[in-house]
Image (cartoon, rainbow, N blue to C red):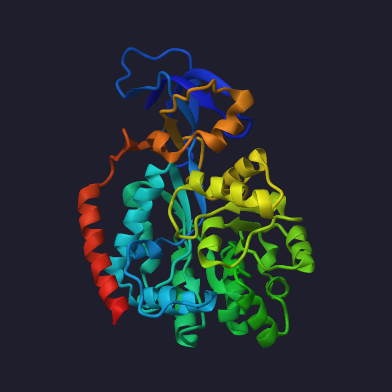
Amino acid sequence: MILKNVTYIDYITLKFKKSNIKVNTGIDAGIEFIDKISDNEKNIIDCSGKYVTKSFAVGHHHAYSALATGMPALKKTPKNFYEILKYIWWKIDKILDKDMIEASALVTAIACAKAGSTFAIDHHASPYNIKGSLDIIANAFDKVGVSHLLCYEVSGRDGLCKATSGLEENEDYLKSNQGLIGLHASFTVLSKTLKKAVHIAQKYNTGIHIHVAEDKYDQEYTLKKFNKRVVERLNDAGVLESSKTILAHCIHINKEERKLIKKSPVYIAQNTESNLNNNVGFFNSHKLKNKVMLGTDGMHSDMLRSAKYSFFAGKTYDNIDFGETYKRLRRVNDYIVENEFKGDSDNNLIVLDYNPHTYFNEANFLSHFMFGINSNHIEHVISNGKLIVENRKLTTVDENEIMKFSKEQANRLWEGVKN
């Protein structure tokens, strides 16, 4: 594929460059800047007046929550975070079957692609349909054309048998795929389960993906049950030893826990909108800046939107500016590169149809990033060298058929939640 008459924005240096780009097809195949285009070349996209840059990646997602969009209010209104989990998410995940899991993954992958994300790090839960669930999600994402890093959310909340099955699902998947070991949160993970999870992660040279101190309840229960704070417990168990480990949220952590994280190579996934929605508090990056990347926590799949919310909330509750916001957006890409995961090389691109009413250049890119560029400016998306979104429409799947399938599965889910 040739992108003609491109204004290319280097996602690291933010330098603007006018050129033509040859996009090579395949995992980690890369791109080439070329001066002339061969007369025999047929697969050409004219990008005159458009901007091309690296696509995005989602640092923490929950595809399994996709069918909750529009769901009628429950009879019992949750009063706190624990009740939100108990009466909403832990009720939904128990109902999920294979068709619902597939529908959730397909619509999530489509949403990611259309919002410019060609890679998603997902954290899945379906305690009554564990075996093979990660393969269903992987196949759905592959069908759309979005690369992924998956894990199953292991928890003891439904008994030791389910926790063991969750560990087995993670290990079975890791035998032939890149992935992580998923844990729900410290307060639902027994010591034996935590120890086994770390052992499997070390065995397959990968990391742990876990919710950390999203709400005060996690800290309070962990202190009461295990006589340690959350990060201290994870550190003692060896969770913090790998740069592949992702700690999601980290809202209610103290000074000592921040020191432990700072000394470690792990990454933190910030999820501002979800924290606002659940009323659990505000993220603060004190002592953690170089560790923080952005996620959506299943609220949506739009990383530009996540970046903007992180900035606006951070103006009051965090030390953040335009540059730091952009770095957190791109730190997901850094995480993938540092840990040598496949599927996020330079041949993952977005073409922006962005014609602002003011000048747009290297000097003011960050201002346009914050107040001008949105996901609706994304016209084409290229994943591993393949055009998966063309003129804002998916090329890889039939969206209408998937949306019809998704609605059918959502209705089944909603009926189940009511009962």
Between 284 and 111, the one lying in front of the other is 284
Q: Is residue 12 visible?
A: yes
Would you say residue 139 is visible in this rendering? no
Q: Is residue 26 above or below residue 267?
A: above
Q: Is residue 220 left or right of residue 160?
A: right
Q: Residue at x 43, y 41 (%)?
A: 116
Is 21 rendered above or below residue 383?
above
User: Residue 131: percent from the left, percent from the top?
Assistant: 37, 74
Q: Position of residue 236 (x, y in %)?
A: 73, 74
Residue 153 drawn above or below residue 406: below
Res 134 → quadrant: bottom left
Assign the C terminus to one quadrant of the image. bottom left
x and y, in percent, of residue 142 in the image: 36, 51
Up-down: is 334 above or below 251?
A: above
Classify residue 362 by image quadrant: top right
Seen at 63% across and 60% down, the residue is: 282
Residue in front for this viewpoint, 165 or 71: 71
The N terminus - image quarter: top left
All told, the count of numbered labels is 0
Q: In x, y percent, where is residue 136?
A: 34, 63
- Tell me where residue 104 sits by quadrant: bottom left
Q: Is residue 202 left or right of residue 286?
A: left
- Name the residue located 64 percent from the left edge and 64 percent from the top edge: 250
Of 288 and 199, the residue lying toward us: 288
Q: Is residue 212 left or right of residue 68?
A: right
